[in-house]
Amino acid sequence: MTADPLAQAITVARALEETGELVEGVPAPDTGALVEGYRRLVLARRLNEQASALVRQGRLAVYPSSRGQEACQVACASVLGDGDWLFPTYRDTAAIAARGVDPVEVLSMLRGDWHCGYDPVVHKVAPQATPLATQLLHAVGVGHAARLRGEDTVVMALCGDGATSEGDFHEACNFAAVFAAPVVFLVQNNKYAISVPLARQSVAPSLAAKAIGYGMPGVRVDGNDLVALDHTLGEAVARARAGQGPTLVEADTYRMESHTNADDATRYRTDDEVAEWVGRDPLRRVQTYLRAAGALDDAREDEIAAVAEEMAAGVRAGLGAEAAVAPEELFAHVYATPTPQLVEQRAGLRTELAFEEA
Amino acid sequence: MTADPLAQAITVARALEETGELVEGVPAPDTGALVEGYRRLVLARRLNEQASALVRQGRLAVYPSSRGQEACQVACASVLGDGDWLFPTYRDTAAIAARGVDPVEVLSMLRGDWHCGYDPVVHKVAPQATPLATQLLHAVGVGHAARLRGEDTVVMALCGDGATSEGDFHEACNFAAVFAAPVVFLVQNNKYAISVPLARQSVAPSLAAKAIGYGMPGVRVDGNDLVALDHTLGEAVARARAGQGPTLVEADTYRMESHTNADDATRYRTDDEVAEWVGRDPLRRVQTYLRAAGALDDAREDEIAAVAEEMAAGVRAGLGAEAAVAPEELFAHVYATPTPQLVEQRAGLRTELAFEEA
Amino acid sequence: MSEPKMTMAQALNTALRDALTADDAVVVFGEDVGALGGVFRVTDGLHRDFGERRCFDTPLAESGIVGMAVGMAMNGMRPVVEMQFDAFAFPAFEQVTSHVAKLANRTRGALRLPMVIRIPYAGGIGGVEHHCDSSEAYYAHTPGLTVVAPATNADAYGLLRAAIESPDPVVFLEPKKHYFAKEEVDVGAGVPPIGRAVVRRPGADATLIAYGPSVPVALAAAEQAATEGRDLGVLDLRSIVPFDDETVAAEVRRSGRAVVVAEAPGFASVASEIAARVSERCFHHLEAPVRRVTGFDVPYPAPKLERHFLPGVDRILDAVDTLHWEDAA
Amino acid sequence: MSEPKMTMAQALNTALRDALTADDAVVVFGEDVGALGGVFRVTDGLHRDFGERRCFDTPLAESGIVGMAVGMAMNGMRPVVEMQFDAFAFPAFEQVTSHVAKLANRTRGALRLPMVIRIPYAGGIGGVEHHCDSSEAYYAHTPGLTVVAPATNADAYGLLRAAIESPDPVVFLEPKKHYFAKEEVDVGAGVPPIGRAVVRRPGADATLIAYGPSVPVALAAAEQAATEGRDLGVLDLRSIVPFDDETVAAEVRRSGRAVVVAEAPGFASVASEIAARVSERCFHHLEAPVRRVTGFDVPYPAPKLERHFLPGVDRILDAVDTLHWEDAA
Ligand SMILES: Cc1ncc(C[n+]2csc(CCOP(=O)(O)OP(=O)(O)O)c2C)c(N)n1
Ligand SMILES: Cc1ncc(C[n+]2csc(CCOP(=O)(O)OP(=O)(O)O)c2C)c(N)n1
Ligand SMILES: [Mg+2]
Ligand SMILES: [Mg+2]
């Protein structure tokens, strides 16, 4: 820990001002890498927009959008190596896509095909977690297993501000600290847990301050600042990889849309509040900086936009092609070999289906 | 919070040195009150010894002794008013007795009579909690209910160092802080959770430091120092009563005996370690101070010893008189009115018993 | 004169309002129950109308919610807490089994817990994983809990009032798929006793035994069977614990055949209990073994397979077909 | 040649040792399983002999233990975790129901969880509250879990080896009251399949169906009945999930009468399931309704009342007496 862990856990680290200017004293980022980061931000934003549009068109049942949180979504994936693991929540579709998973596979879950549409082992991305904070413990286990085998895997574990109130958050942080597990906990503090504001979730000076009670570093970073996130998460990943244990990173960000399309955010927050955060948009900040630095021009922007459109078209097409799921698959994966009871029940369903078809 | 919450949560507050001398700069305690405190310490110690003896004689099945922790046991009860509540664990028999509950009633649980031997409502003492940390939430609820009604009840909630790792500890601290509930959390850090040492429980700079993550004061106090405990807990109670919310108090103490008689502490700790703590005995410290201050002499000691012997004799007699429990009571309290199913089952048992007796 | 029509969500909301009005000790809390009015809007407007002291949001922690409710009930309140979905009540399982269910017994009745745990219950809404579980077996197996599952909006109102007035803790299971369907509700009918089943449809040939969301499915099956000349009765348990043995046994003895219908996986379930009880208590009256039509013993499936998982009219009628009709007079 | 005698704790310890030796992926962890060797000494010496990487203590948090095991199993390990007593597994209930049981299904088998949750199980040891619960119904009702309960020390060894080798998560219930009783154990008998019941005692007149700690009670009852001229068989399920329908139905069809014996409260229990299945599958062979002799539907009592709560020989024989013997040939 640094000399003043509490100050570190309270001060929000920032590299780019909301205006897109570099914060005084911060070294200039590598613009090549940052253009790539910007490209990913645009893709993430486009994915959020496309998925929300599909919901409005009735082609997806529900989509918890990370609009406004794209810098977190991009940074948490890009700081990882191929052998590392990502543990996302329902809100982190864009992060999973940034990790390289086909967004159609990710979204097929929300089309109702199956509980997880991608192969978690191939991509080293856990299924999107719904029961809050539970996945953080799995992340610790994956990390601890790697460490016991002498591997230098790092695990990035995501959760929201609301999830920090769950007992499993506590147990995961404590296990990680006690076992010095190679885990980076990234809390996307988007200020709301559905309708419940941060103030009802915690009266601590910051969520990162919780790290002190576990004996791990807690750092707070501007969650709409890709440069700061890359730096902060990168450092935490490096620490974990070097065997120095976990870090709790709190990203200060905002959920720009409702919790999901099923939610009505006007019941619990004001337009003014939302408007305030429009000014802190994570994309525009990088865009302004890169343009000012001469690293981004219209041509490059057009290229990026085209890639994003292509991705969006792929999502539309992929989700448009309805995938049939065989009813018998109900029984296929519950156990490695179905129990006699399941075999019997499957036979019953087969008879029913044969009858339906006849 | 004070200016430096972390320093406050790490520094161990002390009033009496291990030698029994007053710590420099600490105001001298009221000796009359301290003699009464000493009397309670002697009673607590005698109760621990008596209960352990009854176990050795096979007259109690088990006893989790608080030997070595008597200063905590006494202080946590004596800082409370009549309208306040105490939430003890299985280890806090002496605290419950210090609150005025007949130790025979408390120990009748360990004789196997029933799960709780005293009336929790009359004494405002919750049943001794076994599932770790769960009771802390009840304490918050009792406090919050009082606060909603405008009452100035304070709730003293006890747990051990091991219990701080449970999710419920986290949820209780957080709820208490968010609702500014009038709760004092006293963690008796006796260094072990059965066999598991503190180092495997937490790598935080202290357990009190966890308070920072909830936004409440965390303070650390010498748990073998009655004067410091009275002061620290007294202040926390006053804060709670004044509507200023909860405090987390970590008492630095030691479990002098095995976890229970069923445990074998030689498997996981050294005699040297135990011997070190003999020197920090909570009784001797107060005794030495009072004797030096001229407030305690042989006569008073004899008086106190006699009271303690009387109490012990009462415990022996009370627990000697086996109380019969009616088998039908199995069904009596599960619901306010037994369900038809229980009525039927009770009838079955009645028939069996009638047959046995015939 | 017909009663006003309301959805089950509205009926429950009215019950909470009436209880909050009737008794100062009643408090409502949980996740998103305040300004939002609950994700199903069951607590809509309560925060506005009764204020922060009577209806409030908590931090996001179910064990915390239930544990705090235990403490509040210990200290004179009548907490009504909401778990957001069945599966999200599981973090509170230790509080429920080790305390909510046992505290009265532990203290020889000195501390009773008049609290209600409301749980949006079961499936049929095409939800993503963890949003459609049926958890009644866990609670019904735990002595000390009262377990109630309304099937009609009128019962939702009446049973919730009764649950809040009960001196014992009640797990109150609200069929999600009914939340937004309108029915007539008579809020002036008084508080009904918990523990009474009701015959929703008399039937001479066989009895379908159901509760909660399976009741309308059973009724639809009976309707269908009637067109085919079979007279099926439908029994709505309403309360799982206590269990109304009297009504159930009487119906089955009359009809001689029974099918239990429930959404939860069948193994070691409430349906098992009903089948076992009926088989034991009606042994000499049964023309055929008691059949169970339940969810399969698999995790609740993704939306596309939901209809294959849930007990539906056809599956119920298939089961009825196996009830040894050839032997019948 | 007789096999060495060992207690069930020793048999389990030997199984863990053999598994740790056979497979590097096996790790053992939980509360007090390290230096102390577990409160029941089941992990005695493992920490010393296999080192901190293979057997270690965790912080005191059951959800944490199970959740970390899930992650380790996701990443190539075969964790065997200990819950200190049944009731102290309840904090892990969400992890067990929402993840342990469902992760393989969720990922279409991409992530299987070869993990074992060992739980000191049931009562009869005069423990204080929360130390004698029987929790099998909660697990047996949850699809995706394998649930095993040995009744003999040899089965304790064999089934634990099988559980550790299973590709699926196993809840392994160890009858506490057997921990310190010695029996012969053949550790070289190979790993038996999970899911097979065994006839412990053939019997022509009626079949007692039991598992775990109730098996010896059933055997004692059969012994007693024999002296009174009644020939009772005893069936030991060994595995609750999967359930051995074949063996159970065959036995009951042969005898025509069945009594299910289990310690847990009877309502919505595994005993209910067995009674329901047997009633359904053996309908035409049953001379009498299937009876259940179980714990009452009350919380596990304090030691003084334990003997009135637990199913004992007399209660079993009383139930057998009701099996319509007057109708018998
Ligand atoms: C254990 C559990 N309780 C409740 C829920 C229902 N729920 C889903 S999302 C959500 C809010 C989560 O807020 P936060 O952690 O801040 O994440 P965000 O949605 O803001 O990204 C709630 C209450 C759940 N999924 N799991
Ligand atoms: C939820 C839960 N898990 C496990 C146990 C078993 N157990 C009883 S006491 C104990 C150790 C507790 O240690 P600590 O909290 O430090 O209290 P101490 O016994 O030292 O006073 C354990 C593991 C329990 N009672 N409850
Ligand atoms: Mg949030
Ligand atoms: Mg301790």
Image (tube, coloured by chain):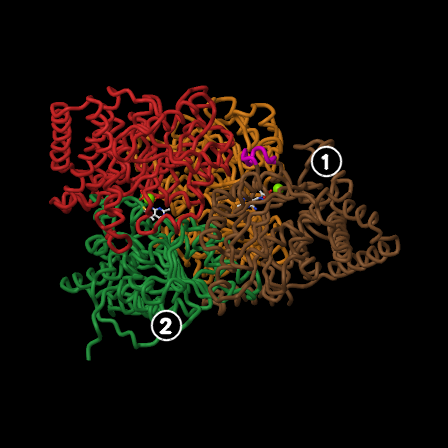
Chain colours: A red, B brown, C green, D orange
In percent of width and height, residue C24 lies at: 42, 71
* Crowd tier of the residue under label 2, counting other residues whose Cα lies within 10 Å: few below 14, some 14–19, many 20 or above: few
In-image side of A42 versus D96 (left or right): left
Q: Position of residue C238 (x, y in %)?
A: 33, 65
> Which SS class for mark 1?
helix
Q: Position of residue A300 (x, y in %)?
A: 14, 23
Residue on which the image places disc 1: B274
Badge 1 vs badge 2, beta-carbon distance below 8 Å = no
Q: Secondary structure at mark 2?
A: helix
User: For the residues marked 1 and 2, what is the alpha-carbon distance in whole angstroms?
Assistant: 59 Å
Give the vertical position of C243 relative to A265 (above or below). below
Residue labelled with disc 2? C21
Q: Chain of mark 2?
A: C
Query: Would you say residue B346 sits in the magenta stretch?
Result: no
Q: Where is D163 relative to B50, above or below? A: above
Q: Which mark is residue C229?
A: none
Left or right: residue C203 compared with residue C50: left
Ligand 4 neighbours mark 1 (CB distance < 8 Å) = no
At x 35%, y 41%, the residue is: A189
Q: Quadrant of ligand 3?
A: top left
What residue is rendered at 45% in x and 55% in y?
B179
Of A149 and A19, nearer the camera is: A19
Q: Quadrant of residue A51?
A: top left
